[in-house]
Image (cartoon, grey):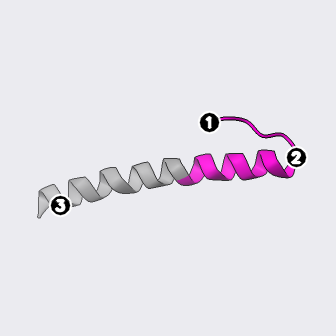
Amino acid sequence: MQKFLNINKRISSKVEKFVKALDGVSLNIDKGEIYSL
């Protein structure tokens, strides 16, 4: 069970980073500036 929780934490942190990156891209697109990740 503990291993599963650790894997879950790792996945959720990766998802958070991905979502933050997407938010950054969408904000830049709103400004008319597209930056590569």
Quadrant assignment for the C terminus: top right
Q: Is residue 37 within the magenta segment? A: no
Which residue is at the far top? 36
Secondary structure, mark 3, is: helix
Label 3 near label 2: C-beta < 8 Å?
Answer: no
Q: Nearer the viewer, residue 33 or 10?
A: 33
Place residue 9 in its image quadrant: bottom left
Q: Amino acid at mark 3?
A: Phe
Q: Percent from the top left, x then y, of residue 2?
A: 13, 59
The segment highlighted magenta reads 19-36
Secondary structure, mark 2, is: loop
Q: Is residue 4 left or right of residue 20?
A: left
Q: Percent from the top left, x then y, of residue 33?
A: 84, 40
Circle 2 residue: 31
Relative to 4, is 21 above or below?
Answer: above
Circle 1 residue: 37
Q: Which mark is residue 4?
A: 3
Q: Amino acid at mark 2?
A: Lys
Tell me the residue at 39%/57% (across/down).
Answer: 12
Q: Is residue 34 left or right of residue 3?
A: right
Q: Earlier in the sequence, mark 2 or mark 3?
A: 3
Which residue is at the far right? 32
Q: Earlier in the sequence, mark 2 or mark 1?
A: 2
Relative to 2, is 21 above or below?
Answer: above
Which residue is at the far bottom? 1
